Image (tube, rainbow, N blue to C red):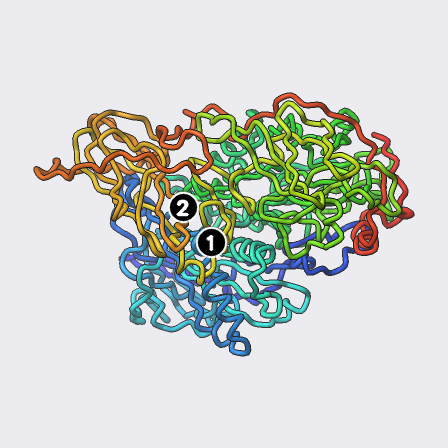
Amino acid sequence: MQAPLFFIFTFLAPLRLIQCDDLHSHDHHGFPHQTNTGSAFPLPTPPSRRRLHAHEKERLQKDWDDTKFGSVAYPQGHPHYRTGRRLQIASSQFEPIRVLVDDSELRDDYAFSPALLDYAVNDLLPAAVNIVKRSLRVIPVEGNLLLPRACGFRWSSVEGADPSDPDLCQTISLNYNTCGEKTGIPEDHFGKTFRCPITPSQCQVIAAGTGLKQTDFVLYATAKDTQVCGFGTVGYAGACMRDQFDRPVAGYINICPSRINGNNDPFLWREEVGFILHEIYHSLGWSGVDVAFFRAQDGTPLSPRESNGRPPRSSDENLRYQAPDSVLVLETSKGITNAKLKTPKVVEKARKYFGCDTLDGVYLENEGEQGSKYQHWERRLGPFEVMSPVTSEYPVLSPLTLAYFHDSGWYRSDFSTAGEMMWGRDEFTGDGCKFVSGPCVSASQQAEIESTTSTSPWCLARDLSLCTQNRMARGYCTIGVASGPLPEAFSYFSDPTVGGSGIFMDYCPAREAYSDGHCTDEASFLAEWAQEGQAHSPTSRCFHSDLIRTGFQFVGEPSPMLRGQCFPRKCIQSGTLADGTPVYGAVEITVNNGVLQYVVTCTASEAGVQKTVPNMSGSLQCPRINTVCFGSPCEQGGVWKYNRCVCPPGFIGKHCELLDQHSVREQVPNGYFYDPQDVTLLVGKYYELSPTIQGPVSSYARVVNLPDGMWIEPETGIVRGVPTAQSDCKVYTVKAIGGTANEEARAVVLIRVVSSAADAPTDPWEDCPVFLEGVDPPADLPTPPPTIAPPDDGIIDPGGPGVCIGNECEVSTTPKPSGGGDDKVDWGGGDTTGRAARRGAEVARTAAALALGMAVSVVWR
């Protein structure tokens, strides 16, 4: 780079000519969104139809030097502008993010397959984008979004330019109109640019285009079979253009065309939507690199900025830029460096989730190549989290990921859209603090881990069949012997070669699902399993059992031996917690004994009790109710929150039973929400809150009582009325009914009622922050319709009061297990006829140095 040229003008601040980083020559590599292939165990898992992303990689934006920065038009009241004083953020400024998917090049890329094009454009991308729109809010762009042209060389103040000032370019970057694999972005998408080739006082104006209507973020989608795709990559994404406050305003996603299936298999669909959502969140700014660009709620950068407007460089190239210790800190122990994110909302949500009041941050992934390390949540703490480095069969958008965005200063997250995981919750670990900071397995945990009623995700016996921790699948233990010593930080036994097979799990021995063992995956069910009374269905879960019909026997296995088996189950509710979460007192398990569908009932006090079934030998062990009823009555990994199902990525419907695809969206109500949905109202004023919804609707109804004086119009869904009494911020649930099967979509509205404007919230980041002044009640105030209790939907106490939120709910979202034994059962080994051959390779990767069938000797350090 040539030496900077300095120019001093009496009518301008001191300026210098600097070369913009994006003109530098940089390799734009693809980086792995890893699975368990990086391991000291030499035998990998063979490819499988059920492991869509068995060797999945992604490409994160390695280098911020490829990012274009520039100015975007915002309202005058935008709090991040540098004015004579800081402006208070008006809570009403935050609105659901408007995402535009530019699929013009994607359509050309998929010209070879109209079916895949239809699947990507009408099913896959909209399903993921819909989640983004519901989960994140931004201060909207004023008018049309006009993208910044990147300078090749630009004039900049020596002290650092005001981010609200326009860029003065000496030259325009050669790649200003590229974004990922998208090339030739139309000139119409770009804003006004000043090109000043000689001095910053003599500029040419490149006129602005018309821009992108009703857009806060544009995603350029392509499907190019690049060199990166040749290594098993499913796709990759990143941000390519940011506004003057560092928020991404343009990003890209490239889908490797041969890696997307384009079918209606619910199991593969769920995984593919989770992958697309993961990549879009990266393009919106989720990475360890981005945290150095976070801003406070008033817009102040949390990291000091250099003359080019960027934070200081980090000594760790995986982070690239240095964030202050109050945001992210590096900790080294036993040769392993961990990055811990310490922002306020992340800490708050982590403490609640793990049940540990002393947590001061959440670890980012410490393993993998550049692009994985520090660019995701630590997988050991949440392998099902959508921002884990490894794709999951049950992706969950947890409060942790929404907290990350909330703390960025660019977004306000809607936490009512967050799902939940069993993994790591204190209800199932017993001690969330130890789970996060201590070794995953220890001698003191051995008895609990080895119990067949254990709720631990870890395991110690390399059995051929057991239940995964979330009871969604039959599986096996990944414990085995490595070809050499494991890293000291991940050595849990006296033999340093013993451990789990997954590097991203820190070599913790975990319960891993068989590729054909998922209880909800009806396509993988084998006829021979019917002799064991098993069935795969949306309501099925894994139970420990050795049931088999009379006249049949397990071949080549010791008997009796409890193993994982899948049976449909129905959870019987016994009460409701203060936050609306149902409490289950029993579970009914359906077993097909060859004569009838026999129902085994287990109560909460019977955990560990063996139950028999007529016409079958063996027994079924009663589980801890909270493990098999987690999320009920929602299916597909959904959870019940605020009197409605929060569905996992890719699913809609009252119980998350429907695929979120365009052919389904046209037939049932979906996408139901209110904007604003978190409001503070005045006693005695009149209000109308109007809904947004897709699909056919025949009527609307409340699920819980609305604030006194308010009701929902059955025909229009408008929530209206005159509040008559003060109330705290609470969650109120309503529903839309429609379609040929009277399917439901449910929405929540957060409402606080105050007596005067002086009591309205001033902090836009608290609950119910949007203050609406309302109007005087009209003389012809509509008469509320008769109060009709909604039909019983299987949940106790329909039509009850609004649900408390935040610190007002000092209750767990999942009931603690009550009673029950911890019968110790020798798991043994072996498999039913035919299964051992199919699964041998899967188990072999966890025990490459062991003879099949040998037990691993567990001796603690």
Q: Is residue 157 above or below residue 654?
A: below
Residue 832: x percent and y percent?
82, 48
Which residue lies at the image location 65% right of the left edge and 21% below the top edge?
819
Outermost residue on the top side: it is 819
**Residue 42 visible in the displayed image:** no
Q: Which of the numbered marks, if any, corresponds to residue 661?
A: none
| Residue identified by numbered label 2 | 411
Quarter of the picture holding the C terminus: top right
The reply to whether callout 1 and callout 2 are in contact (CB within 8 Å) is yes
Q: Indicate which disc, 1 or 2, sits on the residue closer to the N terminus.
A: 1
| Residue identified by numbered label 1 | 284
Residue 432: x percent and y percent?
62, 29
**Which sits in the foreground, 484 or 394?**
394
Q: Is residue 499 above or below residue 236?
A: above
Q: Amino acid at mark 1?
A: Leu
Instruction: Report the side of 110 relative to 437 (left or right).
Output: left
Which residue lies at the image location 49% right of the left edge and 77% below the top edge?
108
Question: What is the distance, in whole Å, between disc 1 and disc 2 at their CAs?
Answer: 10 Å
Outermost residue on the bottom side: it is 112
Which residue lies at the image location 64% right of the left edge and 67% below the top edge?
228
At mark 1, the secondary structure is loop
Q: Amino acid at mark 2?
A: Tyr
Which residue lies at the image location 56% right of the left edge and 58% below the top edge?
269
**Which sits in the foreground, 704 or 675?**
704
**Residue 557 visible in the displayed image:** yes
Q: Residues within 10 Å of mark 2 (few under 14, many from 20)?
A: many
Q: Is residue 487 above or below residue 172?
A: above
Residue 111: x percent and y percent?
51, 78
Instruction: Report the side of 720 relative to 516 (left or right).
Output: left
